[in-house]
Image (cartoon, rainbow, N blue to C red):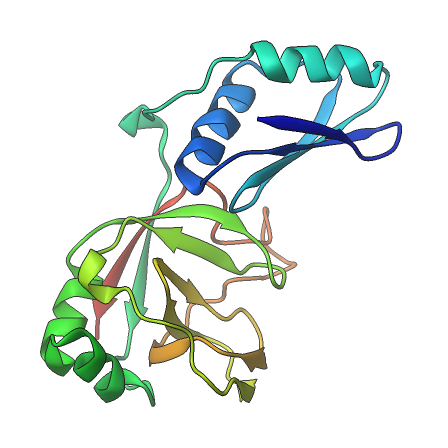
């Protein structure tokens, strides 16, 4: 663990890998310091924002807080995402994985995923915990435009594009569920820790 100053009101905590990051993030959430205003996890970091405390006292709290390896299932929010498996890369993903089209769909819907962290654009959740047979590289040539609702794969992650944007993920389907809605509280459907099940429609 490395704790880096990010000004007078934030620290960036660096870890060696995703599992360690998420375990420490859960620990910090569980034992939240009264001065902490936000905790933002990413693949190998947690941003700690605070107000009304010295950076060294927050750093000491971060270092002394134990990681939490497991989550109480009763406290997990669950979301079902209906997906039309009609993506332009579905056949290629089937070939890359050796699963074929039907196998990709079965693997993608067969396990419950978890939102590890959010980023890239508002409402974009990086989902982990899927079938390891679905691990595929990003496209060698990113698309200039990926449509809103596109469901993709990249490395160990699955994700859903909350708006039309450039992107390099392998697209296997689409959903009509809105990932980001400013009229909803909270606006993001997918937040760190939320469990996600994909349902073929």
Q: Which residue is drawn at 28% across and 29% down?
A: 73
Query: 78 or 45, which lies in front?
Result: 45
Q: How many marks?
A: 0
Q: Where is residue 159 in the image (x, y as percent from the top left)?
A: 42, 64
With respect to residue 194, does 164 lie above or below?
Answer: below
Q: Position of residue 157 (x, y in %)?
A: 38, 59
**Which image quarter: residue 173?**
bottom left
Quadrant including the N terminus: top right
Q: Where is residue 176 in the image (x, y as percent from the top left)?
A: 41, 74
Does residue 11 appear in this view? yes
With respect to residue 103, does 9 lie above or below?
Answer: above
78 sits left or right of 146 in the view: left
Q: Residue at x 63, y 28 (%)?
A: 2
110 sits left or right of 62 in the view: left
Q: Where is residue 181 in the image (x, y as percent from the top left)?
A: 59, 61
Q: Residue at x 30, y 26 (%)?
A: 74
Does residue 34 appear in this view? no
146 sits left or right of 152 in the view: right
Quadrant including the C terminus: bottom left
**Which image quarter: residue 68?**
top left
Q: Residue at x 42, y 68 (%)?
A: 177
């Amino acid at each position: 663990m490395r704790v880096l100053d990010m000004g007078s009101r934030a620290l960036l905590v660096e870890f060696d890998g995703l599992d360690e990051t998420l375990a420490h993030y859960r620990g910090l959430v569980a034992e939240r310091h009264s001065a902490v205003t936000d905790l933002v996890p990413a693949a190998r970091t947690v941003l700690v924002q605070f107000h009304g405390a010295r950076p060294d006292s927050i750093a000491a709290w971060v270092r002394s807080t134990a990681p939490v390896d497991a989550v109480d299932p009763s406290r997990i929010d669950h979301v079902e995402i209906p997906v039309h498996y009609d993506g332009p890369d579905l056949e290629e993903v089937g070939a890359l994985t050796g699963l074929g089209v039907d196998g990709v769909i079965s693997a993608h819907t067969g396990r419950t995923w978890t939102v590890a962290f959010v980023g890239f654009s508002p409402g974009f959740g990086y989902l982990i915990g899927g079938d390891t047979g679905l691990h595929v590289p990003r496209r060698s040539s990113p698309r200039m435009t990926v449509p809103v609702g596109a469901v993709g794969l990249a490395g160990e992650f699955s994700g859903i594009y909350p708006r039309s944007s450039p992107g390099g993920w392998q697209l296997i389907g689409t959903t009509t569920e809105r990932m980001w809605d400013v009229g909803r509280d909270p606006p993001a459907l997918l937040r760190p820790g939320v469990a996600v099940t994909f349902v073929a429609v």
